[in-house]
Image (tube, rainbow, N blue to C red):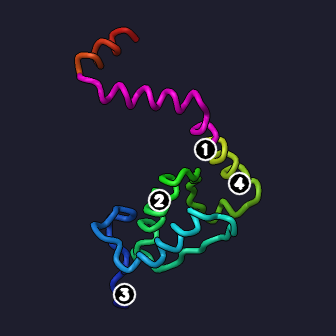
Amino acid sequence: MQAWPPSPYRPGNGIDPPYLGDREEQIEAVRAFLKDARNPRNVLITGLRGVGKTVLLNHLQGEAEGLGWLVIDREFSEPDAEPLAFANALLTDVNRALRRLSLSTRLKERAANLLQRRPSRLRNTATNMA
């Protein structure tokens, strides 16, 4: 029986580590683009399983959203390469993003956040009124 080399994959896919080692140069490059996006470009992030691609992307998503960018997150697989499936997935994601931007959604979220910050007595009163 053939012995396989140890897998570089480690459980915890996408879980933030306490430190993003050796990623500061990449993070700074994306920050600069996010602050001055006059020259848009695509970015391709590649690497072996378990090296931190998902963690880096999650971090960059937070950076972008913190600067007011709308981020649409999608993991594509082989079946998504079919044009109709790709179009449907993309339209679904854009529609979801537009709903997040809608005024009513933002107002509901702000009201919920305010309600969570209130003392529990006020929260119980508001819940009973609903």
| In the displayed structure image, the side of residue 70 where residue 130 appears, left or right | left
Q: Is the residue marked by circle 1 packed among few (<14), some (14-19), or many (20+) residues within 10 Å?
A: some
Vertical placement of residue 27 versus 69, above or below: below
Q: Where is residue 20 in the image (x, y as percent from the top left)?
A: 35, 72
Q: Are marks 2 and 4 in contact (CB under 8 Å)?
A: no
Separation of marks 1 and 4 at Cα, in angstroms: 18 Å
Nearer the observer, disc 4 or disc 3? 4
Residue shown at 27% from the left, 66% from the top: 18
The local crowd at label 3, few if under 14, some if 14 to 19, many if 20 or more residues have their Cα within 10 Å, is few
For the C terminus, the image quarter is: top left
> Which amino acid lies under the numbered mark 4 shown in the image of this protein?
Ala
Q: Residue furthest bottom?
A: 2
The answer to whether residue 102 is magenta is yes
The residue wearing badge 1 is 97
Q: Distance between the residues labelled 2 and 4?
A: 29 Å
The reply to whether dot 3 and dot 1 touch (C-beta < 8 Å) is no
Residue bearing mark 4: 85
Q: Is the magenta stretch mostly helix, strand or loop?
A: helix
**In this figure, which residue is indicated by the disc labeled 2?**
63
Q: Please tell me which of labels 1 and 4 falls first in the chain.
A: 4
Q: Name the residue under label 3.
A: 4
